[in-house]
Image (spheres, helix red, strand yellow):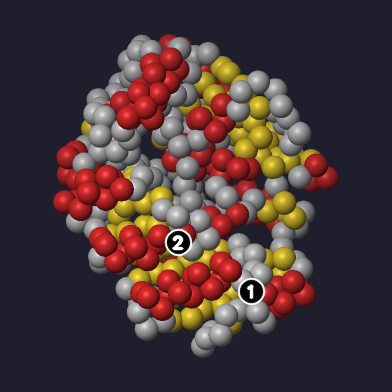
Amino acid sequence: MTIDGVEVGQVLAPGTTRELAEMMGALEGPVAPVGAGTRLSFGNPLRPVDAAIDTTRLDRLTGYVPADLTIHLEAGVRLGRLEEILSEYNQMLPLDPWCGPEATLGGIIATNSQGPFRAVGTIRDWIIGMTVVHAGGRISRTGGRVVKNVTGYDLAKLYTGSLGSLGVIAEVSLKLRSRYEATASARIRLEDAAQAAAMIRALRAAPLDPVSLVWTGPDNEIRIRFGEHRKAVAWQLARLPAGEWETFAGDDERGLWAEARTLYEALGEPLVRVAVLPSRIADLIDRFRPRRWLAHGANGITLIEVGPEAIPELRREFPAILERASLGTRRVVPTFGVRGPAYDTMRRLKTAFDPEGRLNPGRHVDGEAAA
């Protein structure tokens, strides 16, 4: 196995959390946790490691009580399989990361992967408990197996997005929701970015509650999706701001969002994820002139395709992460660009949770200097 040009001589594949702990306890050098491999190029370049921990054999469903709207799984379960399990009981995890159904839950959590459903939150909003194995083989648990849980610190949010640099995620407990009785979507194409920005403002001001709201450019298309009771969906579609809207349902709607995924995959590199207020998406686009973009109109998270030279200036004004970039770019441009007290805090957390720096060395903030 090769990760970021680093040859990994030993790949270990535990079948249980206990086996994972024993393997971690027996290893003395640095290790790299790996799931399905859908986001191996996310993060700062990996430093040399002695072994990779393949979590895909950790694929058991350990508990599911549909009446409680909770489920408990090992981290190697793939998202597509989880969706199949939940569909039998008319339930869902409202998550559709761009990395797709082949991604493992552990990988989605470790990278905090997101997708069009970003309007209803991210994976961290649906986690109620987690089991993690640390570098020396110690097993720790945070949260619990029920929704109303207030035990201890909510460390699951800390592990989410940490790229396995604080501990290897072994098991996770999730809260669920009932599947939408109906979904429907609409699409409109505007003449320019100014018109598209005005439409986003109108949609946000309207009495609507979309589950997805995406603005892509430079074609200036807006896609909006509603999910709820049939009458509620129809009511919202009828109250879209004036414009030449196309509506989609059933297979046509699924095709519309499959097309959005294709647009994401076609975005070039470097692809930067920028956190802005929804009201400032248009300012971001006007100032930095990305070649292409995909913006979540409900919360402001915007993916822009810009040159590496624009990233330092971009980060002076907005929090910005390299969503996708070549190894060459990631060797010269830090993935996270964290600065100030946030950087100091994250480095202290890394030292506290992994004092020898053995977990995914170099991938998170330990792989970059303060911005």
Q: Is residue 293 above or below residue 12?
A: below
Q: Nearer the viewer, residue 346 or 15?
A: 346
- For label 1, the residue is 184
Task: Give the quadrant of the C terminus.
Answer: top left
Identify whether 207 is placed above or below 313: below
Mark identifier at residue 279: 2
Q: Which residue is found at the position 61% from the left and 34% from the top?
A: 172
Q: Residue at x 47, y 42 (%)?
A: 112
Q: Secondary structure at mark 2?
A: helix
Q: Quadrant of residue 7?
A: top left
Asked if the residues shown at circle 2 and circle 1 are in contact, with their CB atoms under 8 angstroms apart, the answer is no
Q: Residue at x 52, y 21 (%)?
A: 133
Q: Secondary structure at mark 1?
A: strand
Find residue 343 and report its image quarter. top left
Q: Indicate the amino acid at tag 1.
A: Ala
* Vertical placement of residue 32 versus 292, above or below: above
